[in-house]
Image: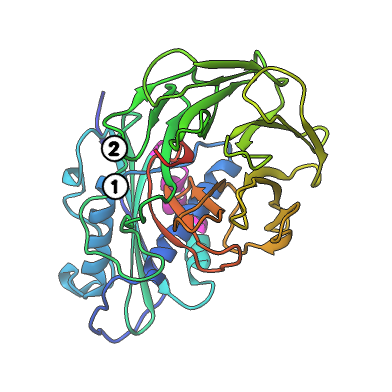
Amino acid sequence: MRRILIPVISLLLVIGVVPVALAEQSASELGAESEFYELINTSRTAEGLEPLAVYGDLLDDARAQSELQAADLCEGGARICHNTDLGSVTTNWTRLGENVGVGGSYAGGVSQLHDAFMASPGHHANIMGDYNYAGIGVVIREDGALYVTVVFMLGPDGLSSELPESPEQAGPNSQSVPSFPAGADLIGQHNPNAGTWDLAGEDAPFYYGNPADIPMACDWDQDGRTTVGLYRGSTGFLYLRQSNTFGVADLSIFYGIPEDLPLCGDWDGDGLETVGIYRPSEARFYLRNSNTQGVADTVVDYGDFGDIPLAGDWDGDGISTIATFRPSTKTLYISSGSDAGSYDRPDYQAGDVLVVGDWDADGSDTVGYFRPSTGTFHYSNWLIDSAPEYYYLGNAAYSPVVGRW
């Protein structure tokens, strides 16, 4: 296939800033990168285009180009400039493009800079271009100038989305993969296009299921280890496996209709995690206390139409409790137990995929989010927390799964 370099486009919004020393990369810069990804992909999906996945091999080059500009190292004293060797930033590409710009890091600065990009024909063409990957690098100078570089790429599907090595980020909002304590839940990924699973601690990805299946995971046999399962809406069957390996289902349970969404938990506190479904058309949960075929042991109407169903042991009492999340108000509603009530989650963004887990092994679950627009996983050890930590997880097209693998 012919390889194409798209003309690179510059944008200058702020002038006359005195050169100053660069600070180390901060949570603000990482947050700005995340916001740029969100705005770009929101703009693309509004036009019926696929969102751009994060490709880690582009990120270091995007950040390096922003650092060069912020340090006033552009040739000829130019305020902003492009990578003159863009074609060598990575391999496996068939099309590359680059946007660079500078604006203010004040409140709303990222969105204003994005709006300026969208109003510029050249920048707009790159944002809406024939690409499937992007790398975004932001550097904020001490004087408030925000430099951004966006590298766009068209390449083969399934490229590694791991970040290149970078300086360790300390404190909250770090993109370094944290060291979770023993006994904590960990994040894995399910590739819905291939039916493969990639779980933390497992030797290698493995196949299980069909591409259209909905992934789930729980401890189906009370051995202390989470294993995979899936719901096949076309048949209404739950297929549960008692090891994280390729093979056929150990348990097949007819329990649902095509619209249903699967969930699992220890509904009665007996130590065994069992299946359940949520039926969106009824805003109703159907829970079963054994992993066998039969009618629901518990039926609960809870939440409102359009809510996202969840379940977790929110208060550490050993019993899983149903909950719903309402995207329109960014509110988590827990149905019962000592933590019953509503909890605002202002960190939620449209398009985030919600999961539940115990990230600090204290016995109580909280909500986490996988943000496809940035490939990052955001989590907190508290039900109320407006500043969750996050780290880079992977491909935007994959689904997150949680367990003690």
Residue at label 2?
A: 160
- The image shows residue 145 at horizontal and vertical percentages of 37, 77
Q: Check if mark 1's residue and mark 2's residue have beta carbons within 8 Å.
A: yes
Q: Decide which of 241, 398 is in the foreground and name it.
A: 241
- The image shows residue 364 at horizontal and vertical percentages of 55, 56
In the rendered view, does 314 fall on the left or right side of 329?
Answer: left
Q: Residue at x 57, y 39 (%)?
A: 271
Magenta span: chief secondary structure: helix
> Which structural element holds mark 1?
helix
- The image shows residue 3 at horizontal and vertical percentages of 24, 32
Residue at label 1?
A: 56
The answer to whether 5 is drawn above or below residue 341 in the figure is above
In the rendered view, does 326 fall on the left or right side of 213?
Answer: right
Range covered by the magenta-colored residues: 118-132
Q: Residue at x 50, y 36 (%)?
A: 50
Visible in this render: residue 120?
A: no
Q: Decide which of 113, 353 is in the foreground and name it.
A: 353
Amino acid on which disc 1 is placed:
Gly
Q: Residue at x 42, y 44 (%)?
A: 187
| Picture colour scheme | rainbow
Amino acid on which disc 2 is placed:
Ser
